[in-house]
Amino acid sequence: MTQTPTALTTDDYLKKILTARVYDVASETALEPARNLSRRLRNTILLKREDQQPVFSFKLRGAYNKMAHLSPEQLAKGVICASAGNHAQGVALGGRKLGTRAVIVMPTTTPQLKIDAVKALGGEVVLAGESYSDAYDHSVKLQQEEGLTFVHPFDDPDVIAGQGTIAMEILRQLQGLGSDRLDAVFVAIGGGGLIAGVASYIKALRPEIKVIGVQMNDSCAMMQSVAAGHRVTLSEVGLFSDGTAVKLVGEETFRIAQQLVDGYVAVDTDEVCAAIKDIFVDTRSIVEPSGALAVAAIKKYVAEQQAEGQTYAAILCGANMNFDRLRFVAERAEVGEEREALFAVTIPEERGSFRRFLETIEHLPGGPRSVTEFNYRISDEKVAHVFLGLTTSARGESAEIAASFGRQGFSTLDLTHDDLAQEHIRHMVGGHSPLAQDERLLRFTFPERPGALLKFLSLMRPNWNISLFHYRNQGADYGRILVGLQVPQADGQAFEDFIAQLGYPHVEETGNPIYRLFLQD
């Protein structure tokens, strides 16, 4: 990280942003209305299209500005960074433009698509370690050995200033839209470089405009740090929005955020998937999860504040989406928008009950609804358990539907917001087994790399048996795994030690009522 002897002021950053050198490689991206979303939300929603940059991300602004301010001697030796994503492409493109060597250290787990993209831009790829931390440590070693200059992805004043040119463009482009009104700008946060730059420029010129930071609810390092009054290191981060999956925000970016950011919104995976769909409907473009955070936050903010007639800007900060991940996004978008509701319904195992159940569906409040999923397997002489999906038209309808079933004598569980049901149970209903004694059920997030499962199996005790294993590749850098393990009750402490040593993010679902209903004997 580049250290400054004294803290830069807002005026200092304003000058650095106004003199930033970004347009040798970056484009002035459009600021355009999201007309469909604006009508739905009854507010004017503007989209800053950083997804249309040459590397499909804003990151090249800060990377190039940092590199363009290096001395001829530094450029002659070359630059280095550690990154598995958009920053890597920005540094590689900057290196090609400036004619300097650009070494990009990437984890060995980096998808080949991203490695090839960096190489195509002239970057010299070095693979080291299994995580970003491993890659970073190796990059520091190479920097010292070869005299290279480190280009930090966010915690550097020149990088921050480069990202701040986005805010400069937004305020200038408002005039072209016929009004300079802007009530708030929503900015995704990973390490904090983007929001630090945007907030520095906006608060210097238009302090009445709110700057709202957005984070995933499972990767909210900045939010926790601001609440604590000091930088907080997260023990783990969610991987769905990999562009913002940062455990520790920057020292300088944290200082700026404390002073200038007006508020924060946390969003979840389903809300982000719904936002990706909203952006597609308005632009016919597909952004990556981090690129949709700002839109997801605007929707949530409008609902909570009951806002109408306001003007909000969302920075679409990236579009480096793995195509295979779209399957997962499509599945969860309807849930995030609450256009689908899921239920577990118990009906009598007797003649006529199935027909009566379907008639109940036809007469639900709000009119007839389409059945999106219906799973059933006979398992009992007296009752049948049905996994049901229904279309909905507004938020909050699932609870009323469940209540309607209950009034007709059908015991019902609302699964609309149950992660276990969404990710696994809907694909494997009917798994009761009298053989699965002493079973414990866990959801794991496994890294998608060779040896991940082998590590799991090698740490298990020989007398434990895998009684259930469910996995679907989502096209991401991680996999969601559902595992049933038969663990004798006397091995309780040994099991906890095993989980701790394994170190994979997990949730135990043994007590989940859906597990008992559909899978446990």
Image (cartoon, rainbow, N blue to C red):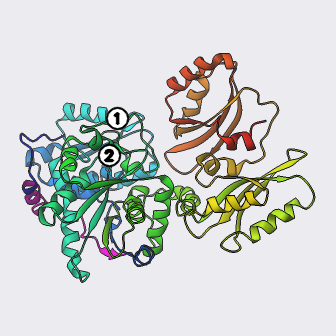
> Where in the figure is residue 387, as x and y percent of width and height?
73, 54
Residue type, numbered disc 1: Ser
Q: Residue furthest bottom?
A: 178
Q: Nearer the viewer, residue 155 or 195?
A: 195
Q: Tag on residue 133?
A: 1
Q: Residue furthest front?
A: 407
Residue 99 in sight in this render: no
**Residue at figure coordinates x 80%, y 36% from the top left:** 433
> Where in the figure is residue 297, as x and y percent of width and height?
39, 60
Q: Is 171 left or right of 508, judged from the image as shown?
A: left
Residue 20 in sight in this render: yes
Residue 258, compared with residue 442, is above or below; it is: below
Q: Nearer the viewer, residue 431 or 76?
A: 431
Q: Is residue 26 magenta?
A: yes
Q: Is residue 373 magenta?
A: no
> Where in the figure is residue 202, as x and y percent of width and height?
18, 63
Q: Is 467 left or right of 106, judged from the image as shown?
A: right
> Where in the figure is residue 255, as x and y percent of width and height?
18, 45
Residue type, numbered disc 2: Met
Q: Is 496 left or right of 276, judged from the image as shown?
A: right
**Residue at figure coordinates x 23%, y 54% from the top left:** 261
Q: Residue furthest right?
A: 351
Residue 386, compared with residue 464, is above or below; it is: below
**Cα–Cα gap, marks 2 and 1:** 22 Å
Q: Nearer the viewer, residue 330 or 118?
A: 330
Residue span colored magenta:
12-33
Residue 53, compared with residue 129, is above or below; it is: below
- Reading the image, the residue beneath label 2 is 223
Q: Secondary structure at mark 2?
A: helix
